[in-house]
Amino acid sequence: MFTGLIQGIGKVQGLEAKGPETRFRVRADFPLPDLAIGESIAINGACLTVETHKRDFFTVYASAETLSKTNLGRLKTGSTVNLERALALGDRLGGHMVSGHVDCLAVVASVAPAGESRLYRLEFPPEFGALVVPKGSVALDGISLTVNECGPEYLTVNIIPETWKKTAIASWQPGYEANMETDLIGKYVRRMLAPWLEAGGSGKGSSMSEEFLSEHGFK
């Protein structure tokens, strides 16, 4: 579990492709005290497992499934990535609950100045539109952000100067594909409501009742 507060950036020092899978060697630009083999670490918001580590680098393995759902397959030697270690119990939850399981890629459509900030508009597949709400949370390349406005296939986020300085977002240009993870709580709510939605429930003249809710886990 992560918070979406990027701890720093790293550089890909090397990669080893094996068919549809890839092993990455990454150097963090900040200290990683007590890093342990088997520890989870988010790279551009994708949760990966530390396989080996030395003082100045660590390695992680990305499966074919991970590469198919994220932008990690586009990384090259020298690429800059956002890094966040897993949340420890007792830590401040300054962002929001982020699982590190990427839902889709969101494409940067435009970037515009907004005072000292920058306003980004990103477009994503419409099947994820129900999980993005105004003033809700979204993780883009692992960065916890607040949705300004949104529609069935787009959202806008405001990038403040601190986020611009501390993450790899400064390199985003129109056409860039960011890893997008929608709100974790929203996913569970949608999943629990799925039987009602599949039955044609609309809130008007539907079969929604106390009995129905009880049968589907709402007690």
Image: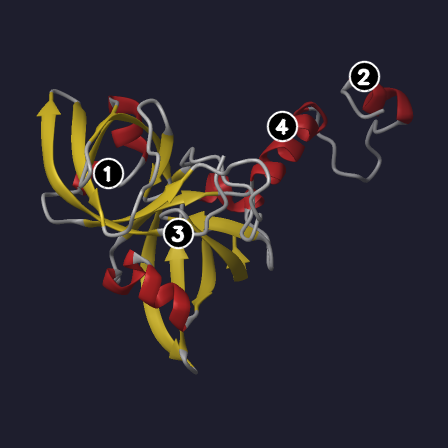
Query: Do the numbered discs 4 and 2 sit on residues whose CB atoms are within 8 Å?
Result: no
Quickly name the residue at label 4. 191
Lower position in the chain sequence, tag 4 or tag 1: 1
For the residues labelled 3 and 4, the Cα–Cα distance comes to: 29 Å
Q: Is residue 73 above or below residue 165?
A: above
Outermost residue toward the right in this view: 210
Task: Please tell me how crowded label 1 is: few (under 14), some (14-19), or many (20+) other residues with Cα within 10 Å.
Answer: many
Q: Secondary structure at mark 1?
A: helix
Tell me the kind of residue under disc 2.
Glu
Lower position in the chain sequence, tag 4 or tag 2: 4
Tell me the kind of residue under disc 3.
Ile
Q: Secondary structure at mark 2?
A: helix
Task: Choose mark 2 or mark 3, whichever is in front.
Answer: 3
Residue 215 quadrant: top right
Query: Who's the residue at 31% across and 42% down the image?
Result: 32
Lower position in the chain sequence, tag 3 or tag 4: 3
Lower position in the chain sequence, tag 3 or tag 1: 3
Q: Position of residue 177 (x, y in %)?
A: 28, 49
Query: Who's the residue at 24% across and 57% down the image?
Result: 175
Quickly name the residue at label 2. 215
Lower position in the chain sequence, tag 2 or tag 1: 1
Quickly name the residue at label 3. 6
Outermost residue toward the bottom in this view: 115
Left/right of residue 34 with respect to residue 144 in the rendered view: left
- Please tell me which residue lies in front, 17 or 191: 17
Quickly name the residue at label 1. 72
For the residues labelled 3 and 1, the Cα–Cα distance comes to: 17 Å
Tell me the kind of residue under disc 1.
Leu
Q: Is residue 80 above or below residue 43?
A: below
Left/right of residue 213 with respect to residue 132 in the rendered view: right
